[in-house]
């Protein structure tokens, strides 16, 4: 694969052109990654709607039938249900941590066992999130620990 970067001050928006003989699996994966970088989530805070990058979301939680995105900058409410977000974010390194939470795998700083087979995750902002014993084996398997 050749990678070529051209800088042009006259260009307004970044353009990515992929030239290939055939759009095989590796090309499709590259396209998916590029599209993922451009996708946003919307969250509401203080009467305003904000566009959030997937990578900025540390975790998502449901409280009193309301769903919230937690970022380093603050908390944003979304009208989407947790199961809708789980489907949408699964390809982007998010995983279900409990019946009421989804965690960004890339936001995990450390983890340790907790009571009752749970796991305590410390995120990059220092906040703790718990993985229920129902979902802990899947995370352990993904990490290659037992």
Image (tube, grey):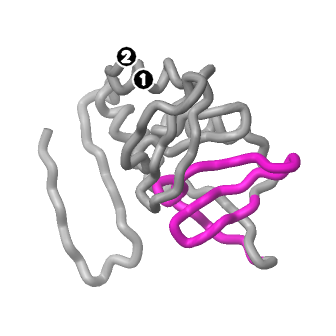
Residue 105: give its label. none
Give percent across and percent down for residue 68.
Answer: 71, 55
Residue for point 35% across, 26% down: 143
* Mark 2 → mark 1, Cα distance in angstroms: 6 Å
Residue for point 62% across, 20% down: 134
Residue for point 44% across, 41% down: 105
Residues packed near mark 1 inside 10 Å, few (<14), some (14 to 19) or many (20 plus)? few
Q: Secondary structure at mark 2?
A: loop
Q: Which residue is mark 2?
A: 146
**Farthest residue toward the front?**
115
**Farthest residue toward the bottom?**
9
Give percent across and percent down for residue 82.
Answer: 73, 40
Q: Which residues are magenta?
A: 48-77
The answer to which image quadrant residue 71 occupies is: bottom right
Q: Evaluate if marks 2 and 1 touch, with contact meaning CB atoms under 8 Å apart.
A: yes
Is residue 75 shown above or below 59? below
Give percent across and percent down for residue 111.
Answer: 41, 39
Q: Secondary structure at mark 1?
A: helix
Give percent across and percent down for residue 7.
Answer: 20, 73
């Amino acid at each position: 694969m050749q990678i070529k970067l051209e800088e042009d001050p006259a260009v307004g928006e970044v353009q990515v052109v992929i030239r290939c003989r055939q759009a095989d699996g590796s090309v499709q994966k590259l396209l998916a990654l590029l599209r993922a970088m451009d996708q946003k989530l919307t969250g509401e805070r203080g009467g305003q709607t904000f566009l959030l990058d997937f990578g900025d979301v540390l975790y998502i939680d449901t409280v009193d039938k309301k769903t919230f995105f937690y970022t380093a900058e603050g908390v944003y409410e979304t009208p989407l249900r947790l199961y809708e977000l789980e489907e949408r974010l699964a390809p982007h390194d998010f995983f279900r941590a409990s019946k009421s939470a989804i965690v960004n795998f890339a936001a995990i700083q450390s983890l340790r066992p907790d009571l009752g087979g749970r796991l305590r995750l410390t995120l990059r902002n220092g906040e703790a999130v718990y993985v229920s014993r129902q979902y802990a084996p899947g995370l352990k398997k993904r990490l290659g620990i037992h």
